[in-house]
Image: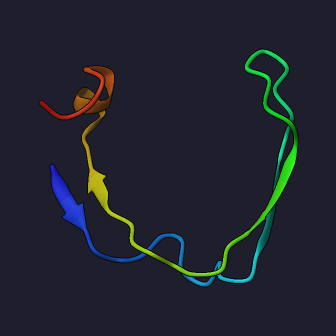
Amino acid sequence: MHQVTTPFLASLEGSEITTDADPYVSLPAQTWIITQHLEESALLMSQKEVERHGPV
């Protein structure tokens, strides 16, 4: 397993995201605006780790 430092979600500031309503959990559709990139962290995993449901 390796940690990745390259941002995947760079340049999304100012983007408008609309979520779908989900009647099963009573969530209405909402619109969000990404105002600031806070932090992200990613881990590279092998196919075996994915099949095992994540790193151990």
Say above or below: 14 vs 48. below
Q: Which residue is depicted at the point 86% across and 36% down? A: 28
Point out residue 17 in the picture as x, y percentages from the top left corner. Answer: 79, 61
The colour style of the image is rainbow
41 versus 30 height, above or below: below
Q: Residue at x 30, y 33 (%)?
A: 47
What x and y, as percent, mark residue 20? 85, 39
Foreground pick, 15 / 51: 15
Q: Nearer the viewer, residue 51 or 56?
A: 56
Residue lying furthest top: 24
In the image, taking residue 24 as reference, residue 3 lies left or right, namely: left
Say whether residue 13 is left or right of residue 45. right
Question: Quadrant of the rendered structure where residue 13 is?
Answer: bottom right
Residue located at (35% from left, 77% from top)? 6
Instruction: Give the side of residue 21 with respect to residue 4, left or right.
Output: right
How far across and down, in percent of the image, does residue 8 sit? 48, 70
The number of discs equals 0
The image quarter containing residue 4 is bottom left
Q: Quadrant of the C terminus?
A: top left
Quarter of the figure with residue 27: top right
Left or right: where 2 falls relative to 44: left
